């Protein structure tokens, strides 16, 4: 028999290997011209020495793109390997997201249940991570995908990083920690906060929301801490206020109403903005799914059960204050669904992104918490806990597939994960063979050019993208979202003194190009 510590070590090695395998074997969402291409274009432009990007990405947010451009320069991964770059970013950020959500879940669960054994804690954290990955999603045009597939090639890696910051904060607040560890954790929080404020400030707002909830339920500890470190806390709060107001990319409109003369109109503006969000922008029909409603409906009977157990049996032990923190932050999924809360956050941020607050909810922790607590009452072993969690999620998936309660949303989430392993429906519609054919035709056209001028190609939009960003040739280009009539422009453009114009003929066997399909 292996000693217990070795069993845990092997379990962690197995889980890390499983996480790496999942990150590598899943394919990123690369249908042209969705948003991933804006980021790949910006990275490629910076890779080739541009100071800014021709995309609509704000200059301040290019920090993330600069970092990846530097990495690809270091690894010598050039433009012809654009989709290898995409896969590297996807795999790296998928693994980071898995780690961040797992760590957050692990920290919360070990502070909720002080006597939980390590194996159970490990597997409950895994289940929470699985629920996060399968529950949070959205829909755009023709695709219903989990959050990670939409944002794995995106600076919004800040979302899982915000959960990681909350986990570090919980360790600092609730666990005995050495001074060196405290300094290390604080430095991480500061670094991630600055990065988040720079590239996507919305996730820092989520962090502040969690801090507010924690402060509310741990106000006595906060008061004790304030008495001891009041000067440091005041400096931190003033610094936070400065950075929130001045360091974000997009200025919050709510600051313009926080004056005596404009304050009376604030409520009216909130309600007006809230109605706009609920009418057009909250995406409840595509984001909210069967798992979310199941867990919220289960919360009230579970709380009755917890208080009944505490009154009559005083066991199993659970940190009730932290439980209320988890429940309160789970209710963040309701913010975009009510007029006042949606309107308030529309003024804090923007009306068209209020729906992203769904993704900040800690709801994914509720099922492992509920099942583990009940299992403690009935002294169930770990294998039965795992079986119950699996059967509950399977039952919800079957209900989601065969009934139309919420537009089959949870089933669509699971289906999108399955598709990410295949890749055929999510990948760029032109194959490697097609892209190589484009390269051969470019060579052919260049050999046939005896004008002494540089060639300017006119090609179908997707082929034009390949010509411009994989082969770096001059091409008629109006941005990734545009689908111009390139033949008409080829015919209408006057003879150029600078370029030799070439109409790029689409090979017969190429797949058809339909934008956003």
Image (cartoon, rainbow, N blue to C red):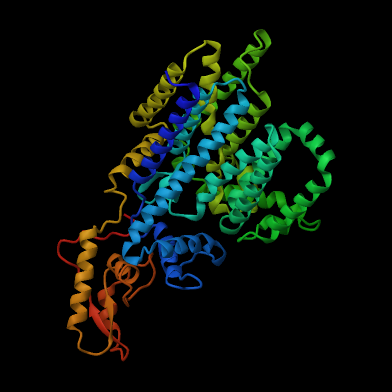
Q: In this view, does 250 lie above or below 134?
A: below
Quarter holding residue 490:
bottom left
Q: Quadrant of the C terminus?
A: bottom left
Q: Residue 282: give x, y in percent of width and height.
A: 52, 46
Q: How many marks?
A: 0
Q: Residue at x 66, y 23 (%)?
A: 320
Of 275 and 4, nearer the camera is 4
Q: Is residue 281 above or below residue 199?
A: above
Q: Is residue 418 above or below residue 93?
A: above
Residue situated furthest top in the rendering: 312
> Would residue 260 appear left or right of 82 to someone viewing this image?
right
> Would residue 172 appear left or right of 59 to someone viewing this image?
right
Q: Residue 303: give x, y in percent of width and height.
A: 61, 20
Whether residue 74 appears in this view of the structure is yes
Of 47 and 450, nearer the camera is 47
> Would residue 118 appear left or right of 501 to someone viewing this image?
right
Quarter holding residue 252:
bottom right
Residue situated furthest left in the rendering: 508
Q: In which quarter of the image is the N terminus?
A: top left
Q: Residue 46: give x, y in percent of width and height.
A: 46, 69
Q: Residue at x 65, y 24 (%)?
A: 319
Q: Residue at x 59, y 41 (%)?
A: 335
Q: Residue 261: give x, y in percent of width and height.
A: 80, 58
Q: Is residue 216 above or below residue 372?
A: below
Whether residue 340 appears in this view of the structure is no
């Amino acid at each position: 028999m292996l000693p217990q510590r070795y069993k845990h070590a092997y379990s962690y090695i197995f889980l890390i290997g499983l996480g790496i395998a999942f990150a590598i074997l899943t394919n990123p969402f690369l249908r042209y011209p969705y948003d991933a291409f804006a980021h790949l274009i910006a990275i490629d432009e910076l890779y080739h020495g541009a100071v800014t990007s021709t995309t609509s990405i704000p200059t301040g947010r290019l920090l993330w793109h600069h970092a990846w451009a530097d990495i690809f320069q270091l690894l010598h991964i050039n433009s012809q390997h654009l989709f290898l770059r995409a896969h590297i970013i996807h795999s790296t950020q998928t693994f980071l997201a898995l780690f961040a959500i797992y760590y957050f879940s692990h920290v919360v669960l070990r502070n909720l249940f002080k006597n939980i054994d390590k194996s159970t804690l490990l597997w409950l954290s895994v289940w929470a991570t699985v629920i996060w990955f399968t529950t949070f999603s959205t829909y755009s045009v023709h695709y219903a995908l989990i959050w990670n597939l939409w944002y794995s090639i995106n600076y919004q890696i800040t979302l899982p990083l915000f959960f990681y910051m909350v986990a570090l904060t919980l360790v600092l607040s609730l666990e005995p920690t050495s001074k060196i560890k405290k300094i290390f954790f604080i430095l991480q929080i500061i670094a991630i906060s600055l990065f988040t404020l720079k590239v996507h400030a919305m996730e820092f707002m989520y962090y502040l929301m969690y801090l507010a909830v924690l402060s509310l339920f741990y106000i006595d500890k906060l008061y004790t801490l304030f008495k001891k470190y009041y000067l440091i806390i005041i400096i931190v709060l003033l610094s936070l206020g400065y950075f929130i107001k001045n360091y974000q990319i997009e200025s919050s409109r709510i600051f313009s109403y926080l004056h005596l003369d404009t304050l009376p109109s604030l409520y009216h503006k909130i309600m007006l903005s809230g109605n706009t969000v609920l009418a057009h922008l909250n995406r409840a029909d595509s984001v909210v799914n069967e798992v979310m409603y199941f867990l919220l409906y289960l919360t009230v009977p579970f709380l009755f059960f917890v208080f009944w157990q505490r009154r009559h049996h005083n066991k199993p032990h659970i940190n009730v204050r932290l439980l209320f923190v988890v429940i309160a932050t789970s209710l963040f999924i309701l913010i975009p669904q009510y007029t006042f809360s949606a309107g308030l956050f529309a003024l804090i941020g923007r009306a068209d992104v209020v729906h992203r607050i769904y993704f900040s909810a800690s709801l994914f922790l509720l099922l492992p918490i509920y099942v583990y607590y009940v299992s403690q009452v009935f002294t169930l072993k770990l294998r039965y806990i795992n079986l119950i969690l699996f059967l509950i999620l399977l039952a919800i998936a079957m209900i989601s597939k065969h009934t139309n309660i919420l537009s089959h949303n949870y089933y669509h989430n699971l289906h999108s994960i399955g598709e990410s392993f295949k890749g055929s429906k999510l990948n760029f519609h032109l194959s490697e063979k097609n892209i190589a054919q484009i390269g051969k035709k470019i060579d052919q056209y260049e050999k046939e050019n005896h004008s002494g001028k540089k060639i300017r190609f006119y090609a179908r939009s997707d082929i034009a993208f390949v010509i411009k960003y994989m082969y770096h040739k001059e091409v008629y280009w109006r941005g990734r979202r545009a689908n111009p009539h390139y033949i008409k422009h080829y015919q209408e453009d006057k003879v150029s003194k600078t370029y030799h114009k070439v109409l790029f003929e689409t090979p017969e066997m190429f797949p058809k190009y339909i934008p956003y399909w």
